[in-house]
Amino acid sequence: MFRRKKVENREDLEGDLLRRDSFKVGQQSTFQPKSSKQLLRGIFNKPPLPGGLGPLPEAAQAQTSTSEPAFAGHAKPSEKSFDQLYWPDYFDAKEAVSITKEGEDGAQVTLDFNLYTAGGDAGPLVLCVHGGGYTALTWALVAKRIKSKGVRVAALDLRGHGESPHMDDMSSEALATDVCDVWNAKYGQGGDPPPTVLLGHSLGGAVAIKAAKRGIPTLAGLIVMDVVEGTALASLPYMSNVIAKRPTEFKTVNQIVQWAFSQGSTRNFEAARVSHPSQFRFDKDREAFVWITDLHKTEPFWKEWYTGLSAAFLSIPAPKLLLLAGTDRLDKELTIGHMQGKFQMKVLPTGHAIQEDDPDKTSEAIMDFVTRYKLTES
């Protein structure tokens, strides 16, 4: 129903060529005629990236957020600027939240989930759930901006991601159960659990919706970022090929940062430095950094992640906000729901990783939502 208007101008083209030169990426025209097959597959080559399968090299064009400098204080990237940034610059604490549950062999196991927190011990809680392949550090720039504004922030590494345990069951139900269990262990045992806004990006949006349905006793709101059932399901036939095109290893962390930004996985250079190195571990046998999350192994769960998502989102009784990178993401069910006033919607002209590409406007949208529903203390 909606179409994105593509704007091409000399300034955008010059910026693209400058960045390609900075990273020694081959300078070739991006404005080439496309066949119908290429146009169909072009869903991966323009913002927003459908689905929720993490940082894909085809996910975005060479463009940076308008709200921040492109290179964190540098007019042009230098080798030194590719250095990794670390979580203490963004979060206040990091802890392992222990959960005892039934393991895959039926026995009771204790699992330690990695959780970053910021913003003190008072005020409402924004519980952040990342997308497939990402880690909790994808929320670092947002956490830094909102932690001093009367809210607290918690960002969880999902199972199979970051520093949380790896398990074969990657269904959205299992992931949502983990989110609820971590919330209960961390915030639900005291006498005054905080009003909680669930915030999920991509796959994390699907998980947040199901966590909201499973039950967060003090659920005060739900924010879902750039995931729509129809578009996500339509993209699944292409995901294996897209993932296969990513490099399998890097020799240095600096190479990870350089690749993530130059290929458009994120449009924000600071985000590339803090978020993307956390997606890798060092393999001593290969003497290289390899992906922590094997997205190919999650393929049996892809369809289940997104089927029924729109109806589930609309059924949540709490206030809801849908943040999208473009209005062409809406499917029919959500279009009707939005016209009926069942949720708020805001469009931010970014790539798929909205929270990384434009953390300023993302933070503003979160705080506007929290303020609108009077969740902060007066």
Image: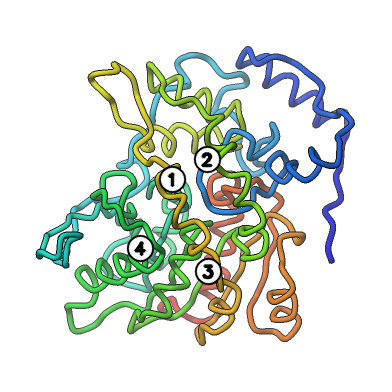
Residue 230, quarter of picture: bottom right
Q: Determine the residue positioned at 79% across, 38% down.
A: 38
Residue 176 placement, left or right of 349: left
Mark 2 or 1 closer to N-term? 2
Mark 2 vs 1: CB contact within 8 A: yes
Q: Nearer the viewer, mark 3 or mark 2?
A: 2
Label 2: few (<14), some (14–19) or many (≥20) C-alpha neighbours in 10 Å: many
Q: Nearer the viewer, mark 3 or mark 4?
A: 4
Task: Report the Cα–Cα distance between label 3 and label 1.
Answer: 18 Å
Number of the label disc, if any, that sits on residue 55: 2
Q: What's under tag 3, amino acid-wise? A: Ile
Mark 3 or 2 closer to N-term? 2
Mark 2 vs 4: CB contact within 8 A: no
Task: Report the Cα–Cα distance between label 2 and label 4.
Answer: 19 Å
Q: Nearer the viewer, mark 2 or mark 4?
A: 4
Which secondary structure, mark 1? loop
Number of the label disc, if any, that sits on residue 175: 4
Number of the label disc, if any, that sits on residue 223: 3
Q: Determine the residue positioned at 63% across, 12% down.
A: 24
Residue 276, quarter of picture: top left
Which secondary structure, mark 4? helix
Label 1: few (<14), some (14–19) or many (≥20) C-alpha neighbours in 10 Å: many
Mark 3 or 4 closer to N-term? 4
Q: Nearer the viewer, residue 37 or 136?
A: 37
Q: What's under tag 4, amino acid-wise? A: Leu
Task: Report the Cα–Cα distance between label 3 and label 4.
Answer: 17 Å
Number of the label disc, if any, that sits on residue 134: 1
Image location of residue 284, percent across then percent down: 23, 20
Which secondary structure, mark 2? loop
Mark 3 vs 2: CB contact within 8 A: no
